[in-house]
């Protein structure tokens, strides 16, 4: 939901500066009379916000239509196209382009009505701190880990077991380091190997249960099925025996059973050291799944189940969380080709009830911890681009380009492990985010390989616009807006196909910047005209003039006046970009309604707010996501939204050091360096907030503390 003015070279920046200094039709400006404009005097530069921004100011020049600002890292800088930073119509500039931790030099030229630049000012120097460097490094390390193929737990059989198979099945599970720790398990064993033909008494050993009087050993012999041969007591010396009881011929097994509930806790042949918290369930499937066995996962990652009869079905083995019953992986998915370049949007603790897939009798579906929202992927591209991790950013964009449909659309989210869509519906705002990320990458690297991804998204948005081209009348209250996309899920999570008829304000802010920037880069007037229509619609149909804020959106029936943080913060960034500073300041004031102070992160065993992993050491201030128009909105600090609001304040000239320190305290809750989504969970729909480290908040933090100027630059005016 962010974009920016995108250029691919200094020459384009120079063109932007010239355009910026050209007066609008009807504007009366002083003329220089052909003489070169003098150098601006009184140039001053001041850094704030822990080095994230530099305020540049100077005295106005008579006859100036505008000014060009130049920046370099050397004192002997020349104010020319190679150092051109920006163009502005007023004698000040707020520089937030990667300013932290540098010594920077600035010069300014006045520009006359004809676009001719005057003499350059003397250079002014500032040395900035990089107060968030350590926080950013930890956040970036966490973000890197979310792109790597952890938590897969690929589950495979060691052999081929067909529908007619009977006997022992064996297999293994990968990624043991991501599972709970290995523990010493209860065990039962025979004292020697007894052949199938043996008839007579048997004996063995036991261990790791107490008190022994609450357990017994059941011995079975299998011919066609298992037949119980007898139940025997545990001896104090760690042994057991059938005594005078003779065991019949057949494959023999001993089972350690808890007397109170007859639960089997161990079986002969099971490992004595196992991975805690998980087990392997073996099923056969003809028309539905039939459970055959549950066995432990050994410390070496192997498992084995005896006496298995496929019964004409397909055998599967599934790794399951024993506390919740959720599946973590299955031999059914062993051949799936995933999307390892995409980021996993959350880190979910293993003990969280949401960890793993909660399926029915036939388990397909998805694991939330393997889910990747394309909005988060786009944010990660911005963060990786800002920090010079070109390969990581490019990998995400290549994967998204491969997934892009013929009409330019992408699914809302994907399962990165199984390699298939998670949410099938399409949303215009998330798509615009992807397109803008591709263009930001292009500007920063000079690599045009992903331009087609952005163009495809742009074409999709053009077809979503309420315009005469698409058969809409100008009297429509949504006229000029881009509609929401396609498809939705009903209350039973059944996909309902069909176009979305509402126009979201957030989506249209996203769409505006992408369409505008495509117009700049491609020279295609269709994009520029579409962006102009979106801009006009936002300022007329979406802006609530009575309350001086943006509404949530517009439908055919009229405006939706519900209240959300992003409407104020991201709406304010849009208003700044299009030259509506007064409205941007009003929007920023409205954001104050969402302010939350003194929040903390606490443990909770309540399923609705579950969090037994993360805590905070100090008070956290920030912003909650929703307000009026929402039913009992959660009063929590939302990391992603708080950082977006901080960017608006930074652009307006405020020092955001206090906001950054508060976000440090939130980050400290995760030793790995991620930013949890919110300070307190609200799992139930429609909010579905969790105290999980998130890509959205963490990527926002990396971006804001490294190069906030990558996002949403001013229009060329």
Image (tube, rainbow, N blue to C red):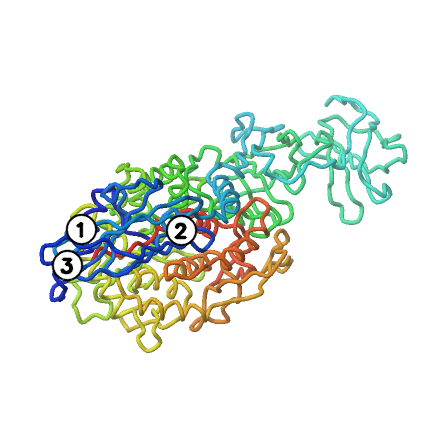
Q: Residue 443: in sight, yes or no? A: yes
- Give how far across and how far down residue 284 sits, in percent: 55, 38
Between the residue at mark 3 and the residue at mark 2, the CA separation in whole angstroms equals 30 Å
72 sits to left or right of 127: left
Crowd around label 2: few <14 · some 14–19 · many ≥20 (10 Å): some
- Give how far across and how far down residue 555 sits, in percent: 29, 69
Crowd around label 1: few <14 · some 14–19 · many ≥20 (10 Å): many
Between the residue at mark 1 and the residue at mark 3, the CA separation in whole angstroms equals 42 Å
Going from N to C along the chain, the mark reached first, 3 or 2, is: 2
Contact? badges 1 and 3 (CB < 8 Å): no
The secondary element bearing badge 1 is classed as strand
106 sits to left or right of 193: left
Indicate the quadrant containing the N terminus: top left, top right, bottom left or bottom right: bottom left
In this view, 268 is above or below 108: above
Mark 1 highlights which residue?
A: 117
Q: Nearer the viewer, residue 110 or 697?
A: 110
Mark 3 highlights which residue?
A: 469
Which residue, as the protein is rendered here, is positioned at the far right?
A: 236
Q: Residue 436: in sight, yes or no? A: no
Identified at 34% across, 40% down, the residue is 74
Give the mark toward the camera: 1 or 3.
1
In this view, 433 is above or below 340: below
Mark 2 highlights which residue?
A: 423
- Give how far across and how far down residue 505 sits, in percent: 32, 64
The secondary element bearing badge 2 is classed as strand
Crowd around label 3: few <14 · some 14–19 · many ≥20 (10 Å): few
Q: Nearer the viewer, residue 670 or 592?
A: 592
Going from N to C along the chain, the mark reached first, 2 or 1, is: 1
Between the residue at mark 2 and the residue at mark 1, the CA separation in whole angstroms equals 53 Å
Indicate the quadrant containing the C terminus: top left, top right, bottom left or bottom right: bottom left
Going from N to C along the chain, the mark reached first, 1 or 3, is: 1
The secondary element bearing badge 3 is classed as helix
């Amino acid at each position: 939901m962010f974009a920016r003015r995108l250029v691919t070279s200094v020459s384009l920046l120079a063109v932007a500066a010239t355009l910026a200094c050209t007066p609008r039709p009807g504007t009366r400006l002083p003329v220089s009379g052909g003489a070169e404009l003098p150098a601006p005097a009184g140039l001053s530069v001041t850094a704030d916000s822990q080095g994230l921004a530099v305020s540049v100011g100077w005295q106005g020049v008579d006859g100036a239509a505008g000014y060009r600002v130049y920046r370099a890292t050397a004192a002997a800088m020349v104010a020319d196209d190679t150092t051109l930073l920006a163009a502005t119509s007023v004698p000040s500039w707020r520089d937030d382009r990667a300013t932290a931790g540098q010594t920077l030099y600035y010069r300014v030229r006045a520009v006359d009505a004809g676009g001719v630049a005057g003499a350059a000012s003397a250079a002014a120097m500032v040395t900035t701190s990089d107060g968030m460097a350590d926080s950013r490094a930890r956040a970036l390390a966490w973000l890197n880990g979310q792109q790597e193929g952890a938590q897969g737990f690929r589950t495979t059989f060691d052999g081929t077991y067909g529908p007619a198979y009977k006997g022992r099945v064996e297999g293994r599970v990968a990624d043991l380091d991501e599972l709970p720790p290995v523990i010493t398990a209860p065990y039962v064993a025979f004292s020697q190997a007894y052949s199938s033909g043996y008839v007579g008494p048997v004996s063995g050993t036991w261990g790791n249960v107490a008190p022994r009087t609450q357990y017994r050993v059941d011995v079975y012999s299998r011919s066609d099925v298992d037949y119980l041969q007898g139940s025997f007591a545990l001896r104090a010396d760690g042994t057991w025996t059938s005594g005078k009881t003779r065991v019949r011929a057949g494959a023999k097994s001993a089972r350690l059973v808890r007397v109170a509930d007859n639960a089997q806790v161990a079986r002969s042949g099971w490992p004595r050291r196992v991975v805690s918290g998980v087990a392997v369930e073996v099923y056969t499937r003809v028309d539905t799944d039939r459970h055959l066995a549950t066995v432990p996962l050994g410390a070496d990652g192997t498992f084995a189940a005896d006496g298995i009869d496929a019964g004409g079905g397909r055998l599967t083995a599934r790794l399951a969380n024993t506390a919740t019953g959720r599946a973590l992986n299955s031999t059914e998915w062993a051949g799936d080709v995933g999307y390892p370049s995409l980021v996993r949007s959350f880190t979910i603790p293993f003990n969280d009830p949401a960890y793993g897939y909660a399926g029915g009798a036939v388990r397909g579906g998805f694991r939330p911890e393997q889910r990747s929202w394309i909005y988060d992927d786009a944010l990660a591209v911005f963060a990786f681009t800002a920090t010079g991790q070109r390969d990581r950013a490019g990998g995400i964009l290549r994967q998204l380009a491969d997934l892009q449909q013929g009409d330019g659309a992408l699914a809302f989210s994907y399962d990165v492990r199984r390699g298939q869509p998670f949410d099938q519906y399409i949303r215009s705002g998330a798509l615009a985010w992807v397109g803008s990320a591709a263009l930001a990458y292009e500007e920063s690297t000079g690599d045009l390989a992903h331009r087609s991804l952005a163009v495809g998204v742009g074409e999709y948005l053009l077809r979503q616009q309420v315009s005469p081209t698409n058969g809409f009348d100008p009297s429509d209250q949504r006229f000029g807006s881009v509609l929401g996309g396609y498809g939705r899920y009903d209350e039973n999570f059944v996909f309902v196909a069909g176009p979305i008829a509402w126009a979201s304000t957030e989506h249209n802010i996203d769409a505006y910047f992408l369409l505008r920037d495509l117009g700049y880069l491609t020279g295609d007037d269709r994009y520029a005209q579409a962006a102009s229509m979106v801009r006009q619609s936002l300022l007329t149909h979406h802006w609530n003039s009575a309350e001086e804020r943006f509404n949530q959106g517009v439908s055919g029936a009229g405006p939706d006046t519900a209240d959300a943080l992003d409407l104020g913060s991201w709406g304010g960034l849009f208003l700044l970009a299009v030259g509506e500073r007064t409205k941007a300041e009003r929007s920023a004031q409205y954001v104050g309604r969402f302010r939350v102070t003194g929040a903390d992160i606490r443990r909770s065993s309540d399923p609705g707010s579950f969090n037994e992993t993360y805590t905070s050491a100090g008070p956290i201030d920030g912003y909650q996501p929703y307000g009026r128009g929402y039913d009992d909105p959660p009063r929590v600090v939302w990391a992603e939204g708080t950082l977006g609001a901080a960017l608006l304040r930074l652009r307006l000239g405020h020092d955001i050091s206090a906001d950054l320190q508060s976000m440090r305290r939130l980050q400290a809750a995760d030793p790995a360096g991620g930013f949890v989504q919110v300070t307190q969970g609200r799992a139930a729909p429609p909010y579905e907030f969790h105290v999980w480290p998130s890509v959205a908040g963490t990527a926002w933090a990396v971006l804001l503390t490294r190069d906030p100027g990558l996002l949403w630059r001013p229009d060329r005016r």
